[in-house]
Image (cartoon, coloured by chain):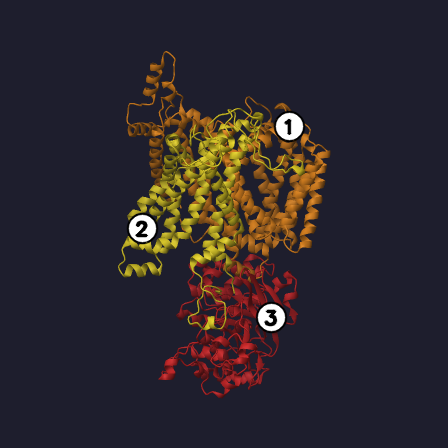
């Protein structure tokens, strides 16, 4: 394992080195770095040109400039850009914004994509499957920047306007109810009658829900409240138990239900801490949740101890997430007021000079992250959905799945333990490839949403034929891609015992 | 060789009917006489004989698959019974419906399959059972061994885990107990160092070892019926005999009946009490193994026998059946074998013969002209090649 | 159970009126493709877009049926709103007609239909060039690396590793910055020259598995030259994979080109492409939405239809899914 990592790191180092050379040379050849100054009419034009030429060492041949850059890098310096600013400082500012964006998009795309893809595969040839397949194709074919501009217009500007008086018009409620019904109906397989029934239920539930939200003007001051947290928690408890252990025996179910109740109640008990916590305290609470849940699962699990612990921890974390969400929503009204009623932001990674408590600053980040990550995940989401669907369909046709069924295992175990585990293997390889795509996408998204992140660093450097910032961008993203590749390989070996890392 | 060392003491491991059947008892007296003829060390006659009680009855089973090209009539009216401890061989080419019919018994056909008829397990129709009840039988009362042990075991879970899981699917017990049972089963099928092997992954096993593990998995719940779908086809010739022998030995240990599906007539000859020959989704001949093989009453069976190379009869030559099996989407009218049959007459091309009793009791055939075969001295003679006739 | 493609050895089967028909690989592929409805729709839509964009304003000096130019400015009519109408009069609309400027006019009065058509032409040309160049280079490198293995393979594959470490958009942007204003032909070729590595990886994998097959061994045994084995024996067997990948890469290239042009690193004004049009008018989203919508719709139509064609081809070349188990 360690040998493998070291060897991979050594190879990756040389691969990166070669790539930096290519990028450096291409960037330096991309245009004339003095173009803007040549059209300059100010009296000290000659002086400016001389200054910049000196700073960028334009008198040296490109390979020598590269070697100089490399030498500086070895000494821990990223050099200066063509205006003399320190690249490392620029990079530090840009890094956290982009990292947030890319990580949020990747994690969301993987989770949602895999869940949707697997559901689609298990419901092959259902309305849901066809819809997902078609939607994935549309996502593949959407230009990212176009979507981003649309999101900006409709999800931010118009949505913020609507929030001033959050009443859903009856026609929209009707359409949402119809959509809810269609989703329910499409997920159901079987005879037409059963599907119609499911459609009716979905229609009524979503119709009632949105009417309620509209009448109570929930969006003006949203919150979940203890009853809803409890309800979601209990529902999650039943769901996770059914997935991990089955509902045949009671032990695991008691454990997860207990976890949901304790989680919901503790939101009241822990109120003093939750008023204005730090990320460190939140982390502590997460660890505490896991510890309590492991205990619960162990105590109640009986003969299904392993499954019970898994289900309980998942339930606990989910309930915790609900409590977190509730707290955040509670601050929504005050936050919205402090940004003049425009909580969904279209520009930048945070509101300039904003200060508030933990929940308000979190909301500020979330409001800024929302649209760019929505735009950014579209393509990855489609990729993960298609891949996990294909992979799952392939696996479900394997002989060992038939063997698992022949043993008399419940379908849940067949899918989760035998099919899903194998279906994940090819998806790990996709992660590495997709990550490179997300970084490319981030460049475009940042341009549309005016984030001063890595993408901005890159495009600006490229326009100005200024290798310094471009190389800084590439060093970070290239390293990230290399690391991502390695994680994918390790994950692959972990999931597939036939592969040995060496 | 007769009793494995680690047979678990289970309620029905001791069979009360063993000595009920005098004929069977007599038969088991002459084990060693016929032992040399078959390639299996442990012979069928050495294991406990079948009782008269029927545990599985398949009645008029039909299976159809709608496909883009039309409806595939994979199984068209199969009926047979299986007695306790009996070994029933089902022979046929690929596409004859032999695998599909047994997957139907297991309830493992894809959802798109249209299944009709009755499958009675101890009198209960499995096709009418709730999915949950059906699942309760699967792996516990009826177990299956698949053709290719390379792909039938899940590559990402350990052997022990996959065996223990089969127990835990039907009975709640501590994992340790289930693993202990798994170890016992690996011992039974002759896998050395069973304890350590529980932690191995399938790819660390050889083909023969994997098939042994599959057998262990099939018998771990003491099933009444084991369906073995071409259990040796994917294996090395040298390993085949060992696996078949192990199958008989294990069957005896857990007192199960076996449905043995194969296209290898040699395997059937040494392994099965009775044999069912299938062609184009239909049973065409059914009877005790010896009569069927010695005096076939259906030209297809005769043709199959004629196409086996033999070491002894130096003079006889291979007599392959000409042509290919018909498409299951567009079956010819009349007997499906008629286009390839040397005995075919006009009636064969218009009317499909039904399975009916022939000259000897318990020997059924679906042929208009079974009497012509009965009259011939060598039933394979009809499949003579032209060159042979000229010479 | 194999149901198809099993030709009877003698004519017994055919004589008995049985329906076992031997089909050639190409026939089967064609049949399966035309049964794929989405692919068929994609083909029709792409054909229409192609026809519309090249016949309307003409191409290579041949003039088309649309009389306005994508360069000539004119007086703004009705604030440049589109005159295209598809709602018939009896439904309360203004009838089905194209009008003077069906897609409207831009801020200096240029006919936007002509401009969009020009953009579509340029985008399609770049995309095809990128796909052709990347596929050819990728196939060649992948084939050589997969066939020869050893040193040749490791050198070639290390090189593709290097190229794969660089996100496609990044390398393409760097190239686009240099060649964006030297015409679509150079731009397309050079982008193709930097994005081939993923194709090479795919082909290498195919070759690695095919070179172990018996027919290759047979060819080698009778002393066939390496180049003949590569091009005559193995390559025809990978044709399905290549065609599918090439088709999908056209769709990707359309999106890549438009993204580059949007960033200002692709096709440069006064020439235009669909991405460039969106970039030019992205602030017009609220005031003159048609300037933003038309090029977007065309990008989606092109990319979506090609993606569907690619999917249909993949299904057609990969018959696994129609197999019935028995």
Q: Where is residue A55 in the image (x, y as percent from the top left)?
A: 34, 21
Nearer the observer, disc 3 or disc 2? 3
Look at the numbered disc 3 and give the secondary structure of its residue. strand
Decide: few, some or many residues near mark 1? Use Cα within 10 Å; few <14, some 14-19, many ≥20: few
The residue at the point 50 percent across, 75 percent down is: B337
Q: Quadrant of residue C212?
A: bottom left
Cα separation, mark 3 vs mark 2, equals 54 Å
Dot 3 and dot 1 residues touching (CB under 8 Å): no
Which of these two is toward me, A306 or A39? Answer: A39
Which of these two is toward me, C255 or C49? Answer: C49
Cα separation, mark 3 vs mark 1, equals 66 Å
- Residue denoted by label 1: A161
User: Which hue is chain C drawn in?
Assistant: yellow
User: Which hue is chain A drawn in?
Assistant: orange
Decide: few, some or many residues near mark 3? Use Cα within 10 Å; few <14, some 14-19, many ≥20: many
Name above or below for residue A375 compared with residue B276.
above
Specify the chain shown as red: B
Hey, which residue is sitting farthest top in the picture?
A: A43
Residue B72 appears in view: yes
Chain name for mark 3: B
Q: Position of residue C115 (x, y in %)?
A: 48, 32
- Give the left or right position of residue A188, taking residue A404 as reference: right
Which of these two is toward me, A367 or C119? Answer: C119
Mark 3 on the same chain as mark 1? no
Residue A106 appears in view: no
Q: Position of residue C10 (x, y in %)?
A: 42, 72
Dot 2 and dot 1 residues touching (CB under 8 Å): no
- Residue denoted by label 2: C149
Marker disc for residue B61: 3
Which of these two is toward me, C248 or C166? Answer: C248
């Amino acid at each position: 394992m360690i040998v493998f990592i070291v060897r991979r790191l050594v190879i990756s180092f040389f691969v990166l080195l070669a790539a930096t050379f290519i990028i450096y040379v291409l960037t330096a050849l991309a245009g004339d770095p003095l173009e803007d100054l040549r059209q300059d009419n100010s009296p000290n034009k000659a002086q400016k040109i001389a200054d910049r030429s000196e700073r960028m060492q334009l008198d040296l041949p490109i390979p020598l400039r590269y070697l100089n850059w490399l030498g500086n890098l070895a000494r821990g310096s990223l050099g200066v850009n063509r205006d003399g600013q320190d690249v490392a400082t620029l990079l530090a500012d840009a890094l956290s914004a982009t990292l947030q964006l890319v990580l949020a998009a990747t994690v969301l795309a993987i989770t949602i994509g895999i869940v949707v893809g697997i559901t689609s595969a298990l419901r092959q040839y259902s309305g849901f499957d066809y819809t997902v397949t078609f939607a994935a194709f549309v996502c593949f074919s959407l230009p990212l920047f176009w979507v981003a501009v649309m999101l900006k217009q409709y999800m931010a500007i118009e949505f913020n306007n609507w929030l001033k008086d959050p009443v859903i018009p009856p026609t929209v409620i009707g359409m949402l109810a119809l959509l809810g019904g269609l989703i329910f109906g499409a997920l159901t397989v079987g005879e037409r009658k059963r599907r119609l029934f499911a459609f009716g239920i979905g229609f009524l539930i979503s119709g009632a829900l949105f009417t309620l939200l509209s009448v109570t003007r929930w969006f003006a001051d949203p919150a979940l409240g203890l009853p809803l947290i409890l309800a979601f928690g209990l529902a999650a408890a039943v769901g996770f138990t059914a997935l991990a252990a089955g509902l045949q025996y009671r032990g695991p179910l008691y454990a997860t239900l207990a976890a949901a109740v304790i989680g919901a109640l503790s939101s009241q008990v822990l109120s003093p801490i939750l008023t204005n916590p730090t990320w460190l305290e939140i982390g502590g609470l997460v660890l505490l949740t896991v510890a309590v849940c492991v205990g619960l699962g162990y105590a109640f699990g009986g003969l299904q101890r392993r499954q019970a612990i898994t289900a309980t921890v998942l339930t606990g974390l989910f309930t915790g997430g609900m409590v977190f969400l509730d707290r955040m929503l509670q601050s929504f009204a005050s936050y919205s007021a402090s940004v003049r009623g425009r909580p969904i932001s279209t520009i930048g990674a945070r509101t300039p000079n904003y200060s508030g408590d933990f929940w308000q600053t979190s909301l500020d980040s979330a409001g800024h992250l929302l649209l760019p990550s929505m735009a950014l995940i579209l393509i990855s989401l489609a990729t993960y959905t298609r891949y996990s669907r294909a992979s799952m369909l392939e696996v479900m046709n394997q002989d060992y799945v038939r063997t698992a069924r022949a043993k008399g295992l419940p379908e849940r175990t067949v899918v989760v333990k035998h099919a899903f585990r194998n279906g994940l293997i090819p998806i790990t390889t996709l992660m590495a490839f997709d990550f490179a795509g997300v970084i490319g996408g981030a460049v475009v998204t940042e341009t549309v949403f005016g984030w001063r992140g890595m993408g901005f660093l890159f495009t600006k450097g490229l326009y100005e034929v200024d290798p310094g910032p471009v190389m800084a961008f590439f060093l970070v993203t290239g390293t990230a891609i290399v690391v991502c590749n390695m994680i994918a390989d390790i994950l692959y070996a972990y999931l597939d015992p036939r592969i040995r890392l060496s | 060789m007769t009793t494995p060392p680690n047979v678990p003491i289970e309620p029905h491991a001791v069979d009360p009917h063993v000595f009920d059947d005098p004929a069977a008892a007599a038969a088991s007296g002459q084990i060693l006489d016929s032992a040399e003829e078959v390639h299996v060390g442990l012979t069928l006659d050495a294991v406990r004989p079948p009782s008269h009680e029927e545990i599985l009855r398949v009645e008029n089973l039909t299976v159809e698959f709608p496909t883009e090209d039309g409806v595939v009539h994979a199984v068209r009216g199969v009926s047979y019974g299986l007695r306790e401890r009996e070994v029933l061989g089902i022979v046929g080419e690929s596409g004859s419906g032999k695998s599909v019919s047994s997957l139907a018994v297991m309830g493992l056909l894809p959802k798109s399959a249209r299944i009709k008829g009755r499958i009675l397990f101890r009198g209960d129709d499995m096709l009418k059972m709730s999915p949950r009840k059906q699942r309760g039988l699967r792996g516990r009362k009826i177990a299956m061994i698949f053709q290719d042990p390379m792909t039938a075991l899940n590559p990402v879970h350990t052997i022990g885990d996959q065996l223990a899981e089969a127990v835990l699917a039907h009975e709640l017990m501590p994992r340790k107990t289930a693993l202990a049972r798994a170890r016992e089963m690996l011992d039974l099928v002759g896998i050395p160092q069973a304890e350590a092997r529980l932690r191995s992954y399938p790819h660390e096993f050889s083909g023969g070892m994997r098939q042994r593990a599959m057998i262990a998995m099939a018998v771990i719940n003491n099933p009444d019926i084991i369906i073995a779908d071409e259990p040796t086809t994917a294996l090395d010739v040298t390993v085949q005999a060992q696996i078949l022998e192990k199958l008989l030995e294990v069957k005896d240990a857990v007192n199960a009946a076996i449905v043995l599906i194969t296209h290898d007539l040699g395997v059937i000859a040494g392994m099965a009490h009775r044999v069912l020959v299938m062609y184009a989704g239909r049973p065409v001949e059914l009877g005790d193994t010896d009569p069927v093989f010695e005096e076939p009453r259906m030209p297809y069976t005769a043709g199959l026998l004629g196409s086996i190379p033999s070491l002894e009869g130096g003079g006889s030559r291979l007599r392959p059946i000409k042509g290919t099996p018909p498409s299951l989407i567009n079956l010819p009218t009349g007997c499906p074998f008629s286009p390839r049959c040397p005995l075919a007459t006009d009636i064969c091309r218009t009317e499909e013969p039904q399975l009916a009793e022939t000259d000897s009791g318990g020997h059924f055939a679906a042929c208009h002209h079974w009497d012509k075969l009965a009259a011939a001295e060598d039933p394979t003679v009809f499949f003579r090649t032209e060159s042979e006739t000229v010479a | 159970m194999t149901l198809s493609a099993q030709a009877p050895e003698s004519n017994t089967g055919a004589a008995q009126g049985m329906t076992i028909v031997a089909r050639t690989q190409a026939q089967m592929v064609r049949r399966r493709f035309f049964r794929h409805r989405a692919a068929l729709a994609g083909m029709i839509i792409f054909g229409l877009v192609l026809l519309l964009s090249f016949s309307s304003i003409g191409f290579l000096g041949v003039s088309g049926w649309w009389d306005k130019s994508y360069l000539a400015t004119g007086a703004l009519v009705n604030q440049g709103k589109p005159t295209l109408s598809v709602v018939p009069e009896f439904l309360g609309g203004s009838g089905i007609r194209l009008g003077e400027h069906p897609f409207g006019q831009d801020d200096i009065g240029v006919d936007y239909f002509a401009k969009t058509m020009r953009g579509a032409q340029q985008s399609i040309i770049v995309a095809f060039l990128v796909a052709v160049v990347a596929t050819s280079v990728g196939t060649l490198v992948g084939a050589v690396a997969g066939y020869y293995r050893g040193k040749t393979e490791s050198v070639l594959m290390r090189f593709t590793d290097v190229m794969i470490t660089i996100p496609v958009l990044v390398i393409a942007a760097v190239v686009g910055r240099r060649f964006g204003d030297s015409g679509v032909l150079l731009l397309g070729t050079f982008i193709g020259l930097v994005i081939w590595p993923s194709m090479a990886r795919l082909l290498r994998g195919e070759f690695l598995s095919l070179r172990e097959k018996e027919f290759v061994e047979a060819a080698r045994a009778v002393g066939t030259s390496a180049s003949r084995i590569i091009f005559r024996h193995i390559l025809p067997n990978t044709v399905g994979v290549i065609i599918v990948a090439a088709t999908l890469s056209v769709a990707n290239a359309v999106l890549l080109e438009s993204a580059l042009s949007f960033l200002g690193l692709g096709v440069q004004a006064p020439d235009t492409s669909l991405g460039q049009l969106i970039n030019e008018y992205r602030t017009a989203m609220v005031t003159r939405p048609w300037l933003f919508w038309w090029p977007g719709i065309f990008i989606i139509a092109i990319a979506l239809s090609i993606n569907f064609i690619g999917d249909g081809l993949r299904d057609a070349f990969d018959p696994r899914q129609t197999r019935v188990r028995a």
